[in-house]
Image (cartoon, rainbow, N blue to C red):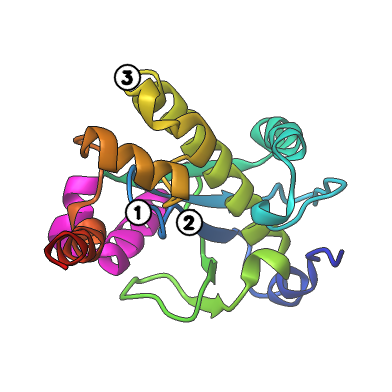
């Protein structure tokens, strides 16, 4: 397994002081919010053993690293609910969640490292990095914080109210079990209608056939 490093941050430190890594989770879900995190490491430097893209880590490892990060970095969360995702589309919702996370940081960043291949207007200098959560320490930290925060939020606010859907397992992603629950029980207020149009259209076609 390859791990992210601080090479990008080190190159920028001669010119910038507060470098924030930014990442999101939940973009591909069919239910629940999209969540972004922005993270600034302490000036004296900071390392965490096993820090990596959140998708490459076990639940236990993510939780362990989250606890360490929570006590040692500056971070903030941005979250956009499904009804707004349906109104403005998932790309704009992702950008908005990232903007909220950046704006809510207690220390204003002077440079941003953003996971992905594009971003929209912001007054702070930035660069986008494809697969940044596997390359940059601050983006990797943001991916873990966003993932743990969203998972906990889904379990507390959705899974507990709709136990028949199995949200504690799929966290809103479109698994076979999740679609089966939708077929049986219908959708909840937490589902993204725009993400389910194609599915329901296909289901109608099957019944017509």
Q: Quadrant of residue 197?
A: bottom left
Which residue is farthest top?
A: 160
Q: How many marks?
A: 3
Checking the image for residue 97, the label placed there is: 1
Q: Is residue 204 above or below residue 179?
A: below
Q: Earlier in the sequence, mark 1 or mark 3?
A: 1
Q: Does dot 2 land on a helix, a strand or a loop?
A: strand
Is residue 104 in sight in this rendering?
A: no
Q: Residues within 10 Å of mark 3 (few under 14, many from 20)?
A: few
Q: Which residue is mark 3?
A: 161
Above or below, 190 against 56 in this view is above
Quarter of the image with the N terminus is: bottom right
Q: Is residue 93 left or right of residue 48?
A: left
Q: Which residues are magenta?
A: 82-104
Rendered view: 12 above or below 61 = below
Q: Is residue 159 magenta?
A: no
Residue at 65% in and 75% down: 15
Q: Residue lying farthest front?
A: 209
**Dot label at residue 24:** 2
Q: Nearer the viewer, mark 1 or mark 3?
A: 3
Q: Position of residue 163 (x, y in %)?
A: 39, 21
The part of the image, by quadrant, that contains residue 74 is top right
């Amino acid at each position: 397994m390859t791990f992210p490093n601080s090479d990008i941050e080190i190159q920028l430190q001669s010119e910038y002081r507060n470098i924030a890594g930014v990442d999101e989770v939940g973009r591909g879900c069919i239910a629940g919010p999209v969540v972004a995190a922005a993270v600034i490491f302490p000036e004296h430097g900071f390392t965490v053993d096993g820090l990596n893209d959140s998708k490459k880590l076990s639940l236990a490892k993510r939780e362990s690293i989250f606890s360490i990060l929570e006590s040692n970095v500056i971070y903030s969360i941005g979250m956009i609910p499904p009804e707004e995702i349906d109104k403005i589309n998932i790309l704009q919702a992702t950008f908005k969640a990232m903007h909220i996370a950046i704006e809510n940081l207690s220390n204003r960043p002077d440079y941003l490292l953003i996971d992905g291949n594009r971003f929209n207007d912001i007054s702070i200098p930035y660069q986008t990095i494809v697969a940044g959560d596997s390359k940059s320490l601050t983006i990797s930290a943001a991916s873990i914080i966003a993932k743990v925060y969203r998972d906990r939020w889904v379990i507390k606010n959705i899974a507990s109210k709709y136990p028949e859907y199995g949200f504690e397992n799929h966290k809103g992603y479109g698994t076979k079990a999740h679609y089966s629950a939708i077929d049986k029980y219908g959708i909840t207020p937490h589902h993204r209608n725009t993400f389910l149009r194609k599915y329901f259209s296909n289901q109608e076609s099957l019944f017509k056939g």
